[in-house]
Amino acid sequence: MSAAAGLKWAARWRWWEGALLLALLASWLLLPSHALLLNEIAILALFALSLDLILGYAGIVSLGHAAFFGFGAYAAALVAKLVMPDPWVGMLVAITLAAVLGAVCSLLILRGSDLTRLMVTLGVALILYELANKLDWLTGGADGLQGVVMGPLLTPLGAFDFDLAGRTAYAYTLVVLVLCLYVARRLVHSPFGYSLQALRDNRLRAASIGLSVNARLIAVYTIAAAIAGAAGALQAQTSGFASLDVFDFHRSAGVMLVLVIGGTGYLYGGIFGAIVFTLLKEAVSAWTPQYWNFWLGLFLVVLVLVGRERLIRPWAWFKP
Amino acid sequence: MLTLLFDGIAYGMLLFVLAVGLAVTLGLMNFINLAHGAFAMAGGYITVLLMNRLGVPFLVCLPLAFLGAALIGAVLEPLLYRRMYARPHLDQVLFSIGLVFMAVTAVDYFVGGTPQNVQLPAWLRGRFDIDWVGIGKYRLFIIVVCGALTLALQAVLTHTRFGAQLRASVDDPRVAGGLGLNVNRIFLLTFAVGSGLAGLGGALGADVLGLDPTFPLKFMIYFLIVCAVGGTTTITGPLLAALLLGIADVAGKYYVPKLGAFIVYALMLVILMVRPQGLFARAGGGK
């Protein structure tokens, strides 16, 4: 098999990918009463997808990915409040701004060790948190940005208002999620995507076969930031609200956990992780709402002690 | 002005004692331990509970806080931490975040979420006013205690047999083991002492920093800044970084309260951009 054919074979559509898309569509049709919860899951999945691009494919450990999520959320909410209420415009603005922020921040993560990157990503999220807190004339400070009214969603099928049950919101989120998934899928199966994996596994070697490591890191970080911004915009638009907790450390840590539950480095980990994580959270919270964090922590510790791979892929236990 | 400087130095010394254990695990064992603040919190709560519920005097509580936190560290190191040293950094981060979440919720469950106060003994309250410098007695106490600890640490690391063994184990655990050193025991002892120091720092800082269950999360970033900016190859690096951070934080909050912690984070980003290995790292050394 030639190299080109090999790459094509690796990029072929698998049966379970189609099944997953069908399941997403079916969830909209068959579970209308759970649209709000499903919407939450889909947004989390999109957010985790963006983290997968930099963590799973480029190997950057980030503790501040919520920076881009929050930036997109505030951007979309402010556009709706101050400029125009059309969701698509807000989405585009949020994606563009988050991408610009990502491009700027990517310059910070090129140098240093894992610890330096950890600190820098965390620092950016903290700075944005402080900014959103202090610029209260613009963002509403600790009270959050209130009074965001979204206009109807304009589509080729007509205009739809965002309803209380969240069906329009969920459909909107699903469309954005599938579009981003498609873009990310094209990306990781392109030569660019393979070069990312090469530099994740060994930067020095990747550089010495002539890959421009820094340019690739900047590119993937920018794209991941844009997708995270889209997730944030969805969050703000479908809830009509943006508050400081979009920048919170818990959110950065949570999305990392979601991705790790689902498995890194194959794009769909975010979706599976978000489903498992949210259902788990619902179940535990119903039982002990205040102490959910304890069980989350315990889960993390056990997950790492047992080994991420082995818990997610139980069949690996039996391999030699 | 000088009062601010003084407060900043006291704050910095406190941060140093809190973070030095982290510098050790990070620099010596290359382990990213985000749960370090949990040990400090343990020390703080030991002090508060002993004082408020049993009426133990403050000065007796401090060594007990050290011992308590050191004991927790000594139990956890062989049980959990030792398996993590060789893992990828992502695993270490997830593992220690998990520990933080558990510690925060456990304290919330057993003690409650309200902030705790320390009743300082009378001779530590108030301040000396010498000309235009106001010197808080408690802050002076902190500086004296932390300064003595720093000198002792430096002496132990450079002038004792144990210090030499530790440095050898860190430089190359395999060769050190081959020469007959019990590397596991050395790491265990070091980890316990580092945790104990954090506990002592937490006890000392309960009055200055405030103490509630979210302590490990709130101050995690500060400890990490001390280590990342100071570099982890020496004792003096983190010390200078801690002092710098303490002074910048106190002065920033006094002169431009609107910006809050913004200055510290921005300063950190700039320093890390210019010197990704830390301000005081050995040239060309380390990972």
Image (cartoon, rainbow, N blue to C red):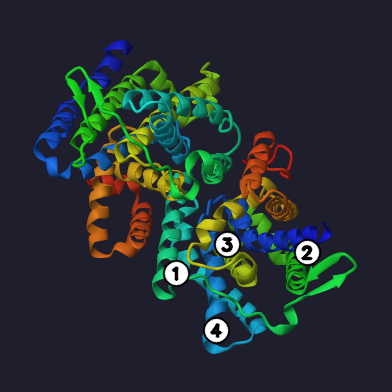
Which residue is tagged 3? B187
Which residue is tagged 2? B159
Which tag is nearer the camera, tag 1 or tag 3? Answer: 1
Check residue B52 in the rendering and tell me which mark sits there, or answer none. 4
Residue at the far left: name it.
A30
Q: What residue is shown at x 41% (from left), y 46% (from top)?
A: A251
Q: Earlier in the sequence, mark 2 or mark 1?
A: 1
Which tag is nearer the camera, tag 4 or tag 2? Answer: 4
Badge 1 crowding class, 10 Å Cα cut-off, few under 14, some 14 to 19, many 20 or more, is some
Vertical arrangement, residue A288 with respect to residue A132, above or below: below
| Badge 3 and badge 4 both on one subunit | yes
Vertical arrangement, residue B19 with respect to residue B60, above or below: above
The residues bearing labels 3 and 4 have C-alpha atoms spaced at a distance of 35 Å
Dividing the image into 4 quarters, which one contains the N terminus of chain B?
A: bottom right
Q: Determine whether label 4 and label 1 are within 8 Å by CB.
A: no
Residue at the far right: name it.
B131
Chain for disc number 3: B
The residues bearing labels 2 and 3 have C-alpha atoms spaced at a distance of 18 Å
Q: Determine whether label 3 and label 4 are within 8 Å by CB.
A: no
Chain for disc number 2: B
Residue A79 position in % (x across, y down): 42, 29
Which image quarter: residue B268?
top right
Chain for disc number 1: B
Amino acid type of the residue tagged 2 in the rendering? His
The residues bearing labels 2 and 1 have C-alpha atoms spaced at a distance of 44 Å
Which residue is tagged 1? B113
| Badge 2 and badge 1 both on one subunit | yes
Residue at the far bottom: name it.
B55
Q: What residue is shown at x 82% (from left), y 67% (from top)?
A: B134
Which image quarter: residue A27?
top left
